[in-house]
Each structure stands twice: as C-alpha cells, then as structure tokens.
Amino acid sequence: MSFHLKPEKLKLKTLLGDYPNTMALKNGVLRPKLFDFEFDPVKTPNRAFKRVVRELEFDVAELALVTYLQAKAYGKPLALLPAVVGEGRFQHHCLVYNAERGKVTVAQLNGKRVGIRAHAQTTVTWVRGVLANDYGVDLPKVQWVTFEHGHLAEFPDPKGFERAPEGSKMVDMLLSGELDAAIIGSDLPDDPRLQPVLPDPHDAAQAWSRRLQMLPINHMMAIDMDLCKDRPDVIQEVYQVLAQSKAMAKDENPRRSVHAVKGEMDLTPFGIEPNRKALEVLIRYTYQQGLIPRPYSVDELFDETRDLLGK
C-alpha cells in the first residue's frame, strides 16, 4: 500500500492584534488554505514593532505606518499590504492637559513641555501635523519629552528632545505638573482632569476630515520581502483572508465598520485607492517633521504588492 503524503502547510509567524476585522482569523473561524498563521502571543502589537523592524522576526506583521515609512527609508526588506487593521480614528482629542493645574491653549504650546510616547509614533505624527498645518504651531519651539526609543534603532531622538526618567509614566507626570500637556492615543484614560488642548476637538476633527476627505489610519500589514518574491500566491491569500475577516465582522455588526463623517466612511479601508488620501496626508506630515528623508508617493509604497493584488 502506498501513501501520498500531503506537504505540510506553510506556517507564517504573524503579529496581529485583536480587532473586530481580525477576529475571524484570530479565533480560527476563518482558516487559510495555503498556510497557517502562527500568531505571536503579545497582547499589544505595538510593543512588538521593534521586533518587526529590528530583528525582522515576522513573516506577516501589523505595523504602524510611520514605522513602515521609516523602515522603507532605511532599506528594511518589508513590503506593505493596503489592508488597515485596527480602526481608523480621529486624533484631535489626543492632545490633553491637566485642568486642575490651569488651562493650556494651542497658542501657549511654544515652550511648553509636551509628553509623547515616542518621537516617530504615528498618533503623535498625526497630531503634530494638525498642530503645524491647521493651527500654526511652530513644532521645534515645543519642548518634546519622550518616554520610549523609536522602533528603528537607526532613528534616535533628535537633539533638543528630552527623555523622561526611566520608569516614569506620562499620565503621572502630566497630573503632577512635570508636563504641561501630552499626546496620548488609544490608552487615553477616562479622567475628567484630562481635557483637550484643541477647542471642540470632535467638531474640529469632523470638519478636518470632511475637508481632506479621509480618516486618519495608523496600522497596515507588512510582509517579509522574500515571501513576496517566493510565494506570491501566499501573499494573495493573506490579503484575501484579511478582507474576508473584515467582511465577516461587518456582517456581524454592520454599524462598526462605518463612521458618519461624509456619508459612510470605512474605518478599515482595504486597497490603494481607498487609502490614498489618508496616506498622502500622513506622508506629508511625516516628511515635514523630519521623520523620513523624502516624501514618498503612495504608489511606491506598494511596488512589491500592487501587481500581486491586482490593485
């Protein structure tokens, strides 16, 4: 009796967070045909972004967009899929001050000590871009206080930036008065003492979004360059199953995947064109802030994957 053994499925070491549009993959309801995801157990994906760009540890990885732009600038062998994971969100409300210690306005930011997790954090880049382009803030005149090294070892904090004491926490320093303001993303505490610096931030964000016809996005999927070259069929299926997982989340709760800005706005857009306007703005902000050496075009971000996806 002869046996025809099936070749073992490819296993892809994967970094991916738990989001509505990824849960069908994370909980195994949706299974790829050509490969299996081996999900890293890290609970907060951004804690592993250094491993993505420094150790090149993953075959498939969620990655912050500014980190990807810098990785491209430094020649890291990573390709980008136009697949947003984690919902896009407004950022205007993320710059906060401690109301117990007195109001801080946009006009007062020059010379103020403003805490940021890292200089090249994507949320920070969005907020500083808004401050500079829409409110006239002279960013170099702000005293930026960082709490972490950047994801890329090649890009340290610039001269003039201050590093918070080891082990200190941004919210604690803000509440104690050691910081005048801080940019805090998805982990912004629900604390009435923390008030937005920008006036009417949600209305301002809606107007800004309507004017630019986009919603800020933070994370897409990065792919090992060798995998793109060696197994284009696998890359195609990675994109397909991500899209299927998103569709399953929308079918389960259709209200989660839209945002009332101008009609219905997709919070997790897939494809180059649906992401073009947001990427154009983010690239411009990133270049203005000296985080990348030149303003890339949107199309060149997807040179390695565009033909594979037919986009």
Image (spheres, rainbow, N blue to C red):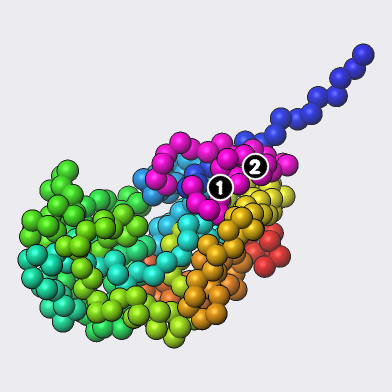
The amino acid type found where label 2 is placed reads: Val
The structure residue drawn at horizontal position 7% and vertical position 60%, both measured from the top left corner, is 177
**Between residues 123 and 302, which one lies in front from this camera angle?**
123
**Between residues 281 and 293, which one lies in front from this camera angle?**
281
Q: Work out whether 141 lies above or below 38.
A: below
Q: Is residue 37 magenta?
A: yes
Q: Is residue 252 visible?
A: yes
Q: Which residue is mark 1?
A: 23
- Within 10 Å of disc 2 (Cα), the crowding (few <14, some 14-19, many 20+) is few
Task: Report helix, strand or loop for mark 2.
Answer: loop
Give the image location of residue 182, x and y in percent: 20, 63
Q: Left or right: 134 with respect to 146?
A: right
Q: Looking at the rendering, which quadrant does residue 171 occupy?
A: bottom left
Tag shown at residue 29: 2
Q: Residue furthest top?
A: 1
Task: Report helix, strand or loop for mark 1.
Answer: helix
Tag shown at residue 69: none
The structure residue drawn at horizontal position 69% and vertical position 50%, both measured from the top left corner, is 237
The structure residue drawn at horizontal position 60% and vertical position 46%, both measured from the top left corner, is 24
**Between residues 163 and 203, which one lies in front from this camera angle?**
203
Q: Is residue 78 visible?
A: no
Q: Looking at the rendering, which quadrant does residue 263 occupy?
A: bottom right
Magenta stretch? 18-45
Give the image location of residue 158, x and y in percent: 22, 62
Q: Looking at the rendering, which quadrant does residue 137 occupy?
A: bottom left
The amino acid type found where label 1 is placed reads: Met
